Image: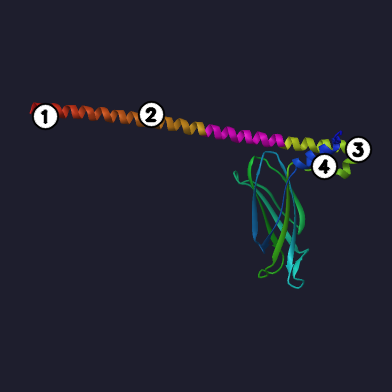
Amino acid sequence: MATPRRHPLVSLCLLLVLAAVANALHFYLDTNEKRCFIEELPTDTVVEGHYKALEWSEQEQKYVENTNLGILVEVDELETGHNVVKTRGPSDGKFTFTSHDSGDHSICLSSNYGTTWFSTTHIRLHLDIVVGKTKPDTEQDRSHVSELSQKLRDLNMKLEDVRREQQYQREREAAFRDLSESTNSKAVWYTVVQIGVLIATCVWQMRHLKRFFEERKMH
């Protein structure tokens, strides 16, 4: 019996799903509390985040939306200390940035609740982070591109992200290899110096013993 053939569009869609890198989570924090996450990124990588904050309501005994609740988003490069993003948004918003250098990036979120100084509230924050090229606006492109060309464009973007990730890993491997070679070279020289000192010590002891026995014979 002949096996069914998979349509090229189906295979293309599967590749796009596997290429996407997304992190979705939720956590809890109090008023003016900051939570940070570390994301390792290659150079020139687009990161898009979507968050939604809900406040605990004692009256309703559940988490509800509050228009007065604001969220402060800060993104910093850990190695250079460069601030990439610092923006205040509503309880439901997005942020986007592009990594200028490869390495670890700190993504911090905190509440910006505009009530009294002594008021406290508990917040549940949903966060969805997508690492990689963001998709173009489909509503704008729908008028002049077909569905297949749009998917091919997305696939090319994902392949470019993979290429940058591979380049970043090669750079890390090269740096680690140079460090290992430098360490091995120092270890070899240290061993040679130790051997030289040991040989010199043995020669000195032998000469000292020889002189000692010669002096004993003379007496």
Q: Is residue 157 magenta?
A: no
Residue drawn 71% across and 68% down? Answer: 115
Q: How is the image coloured?
A: rainbow
Magenta residues: mostly which secondary structure? Answer: helix
Q: Which mark is residue 144?
A: 3
Front position in the image: 25 or 67: 25
Where does the image place residue 101, in percent across and percent down from the top left? 65, 40
- Foreground disc of the pair 3, 1: 1
Residue position marked by numbered label 2 in the rendering: 192
* Earlier sequence position, callout 1 versus callout 2: 2
Mark 3 belongs to which amino acid?
Answer: His
* Earlier sequence position, callout 2 versus callout 3: 3
Q: Which mark is residue 216?
A: 1
Q: Is residue 58 left or right of residue 149?
A: left
Residue position marked by numbered label 4 in the rendering: 136
Q: In this picture, which residue range is highlighted in magenta?
A: 162-179
Measure the alpha-carbon separation of dots 1 and 4: 97 Å
Q: What secondary structure is marked by label 2?
A: helix
**Residue that lies at the very extreme toward the front in this rendered image:** 1
Residue drawn 80% across and 40% down? Answer: 14
* Earlier sequence position, callout 2 versus callout 4: 4
Mark 4 belongs to which amino acid?
Answer: Pro
Where does the image place residue 132, in percent across and percent down from the top left? 73, 42
